[in-house]
Image (spheres, rainbow, N blue to C red):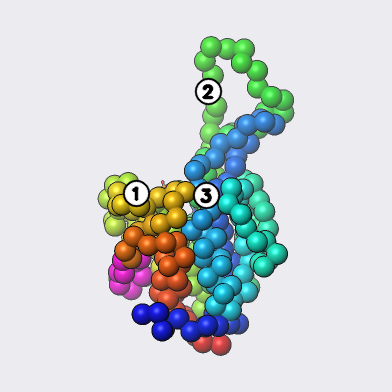
Amino acid sequence: AFFFRKKGDFQGKKVLLTMGPTQESIDPVRFISNHSSGKMGYALAEAFLERGAEVFVVSGPVSIEVAKEKFHWQDVLSAQSMYEAAAALHSQADIVVFAAAVADYGPQEVAAEKIKKDDDEMSISLKKNIDIAFTLGQSKKAGQIHVGFALETENEEKNAKGKLEKKNFDLIVLNSMKETGAGFRLDTNRVHLFHRNGKKVSSAVERKDSIAALILDEIKKHDNWKQA
Ligand code: CTP
Ligand code: CA
């Protein structure tokens, strides 16, 4: 249904989007992170922009090429710094998209000096990072639309719906690891979208820009959507 995608249909909307992985420092030369490429998040940022929105991106360190000058762009490293940047922008956003692959845990302490390989065994104590989507979901503004992502390898639908509830999302995008072509670093993806009202929409295996267009179309179906 390509003809529904009017150019400029997000004109007047302010979008806050987190994307990419986060990096949690172990010592001055090492960190914990994950395989997020930022491709899906960046495809969304571009889709919002092309359709007329003002886009505020808070991005972890991504390996893909990005045109930062087109956006209000802030680079961050850790989950905590991503939270602080997003929290500062949150109240003025109409749409908030949590596309970042936030590290769930980070080192309890960051070593001041490079850790030496003195011992045959070593371990690092980790502590849970702040849940950005959950925390901002607690202070969701009236009329605001929150969109989350879920990456699951088992009980996919149940877990995704659980996250929708827990994090106060209006829409959640489930990335199925089990299905062909889906996953990190690829240019294609297959997703299932669950609305708060129970409605479900699935994509085919498609390029990430097509998936982004579909997500924007679904955002427009939300009760809080008002054309400016
Ligand atoms: N998220 C976040 N802050 C975190 C962890 C996750 O904002 N510290 C957001 C992600 O950006 C995503 C959603 O929450 O939109 C779900 O992330 P996911 O990793 O699938 O869920 P978790 O709650 O971290 O649960 P788990 O990893 O144990 O499945
Ligand atoms: Ca997680």
The number of numbered badges drawn on the structure is 3
Quarter of the image where the C terminus is located? bottom right
Question: In the image, is 28 to the left or to the right of 181?
Answer: right
Q: What residue lies at 72% left-to-right and 25% top-to-bottom?
A: 113
Question: In the visual, does 169 lie left or right of 107?
Answer: left
Foreground pick, 210 / 111: 210
Is residue 196 rendered magenta in the image?
yes
- Residue 177's tag is 1
Horizontal and vertical percent for residue 197?
Answer: 33, 73
Q: Is residue 169 visible?
A: no
Rounded to the nearest angstrom, the CA distance separating label 2 from label 3 is 27 Å
Mark sitting earlier along the chain (3/1): 3
> Which residue is the site of mark 2?
123
Q: Which residues are magenta?
A: 193-202
- Residue at the disc numbered 3: 37
Mark closer to the chain start, 2 or 1: 2
> Mark 2 or mark 3, which has the lower sequence index?
3
Q: Is residue 210 above or below residue 223?
A: above
Q: Nearer the viewer, mark 2 or mark 3?
A: 3
Determine the image quadrant of residue 210: bottom left
* Residue at figure coordinates x 52%, y 49% from the top left: 37
Q: Secondary structure at mark 2?
A: loop
Q: Is residue 35 above or below residue 182?
A: above
CA gap, disc 3 and disc 1: 15 Å
Residue at 34%, 60% in the rendered image = 205
The crowding category of the residue bearing disc 3, from other C-alpha atoms within 10 Å (few below 14, some 14 to 19, many at least 20), is: many
- Compute the Cα span from label 2 to label 1: 29 Å
Specify few, some or many for label 2: CA neighbours under 10 Å numbering under 14, 14-19, or 20 or more: few
Q: CB of residue at label 2: within 8 Å of ligand 1? A: no
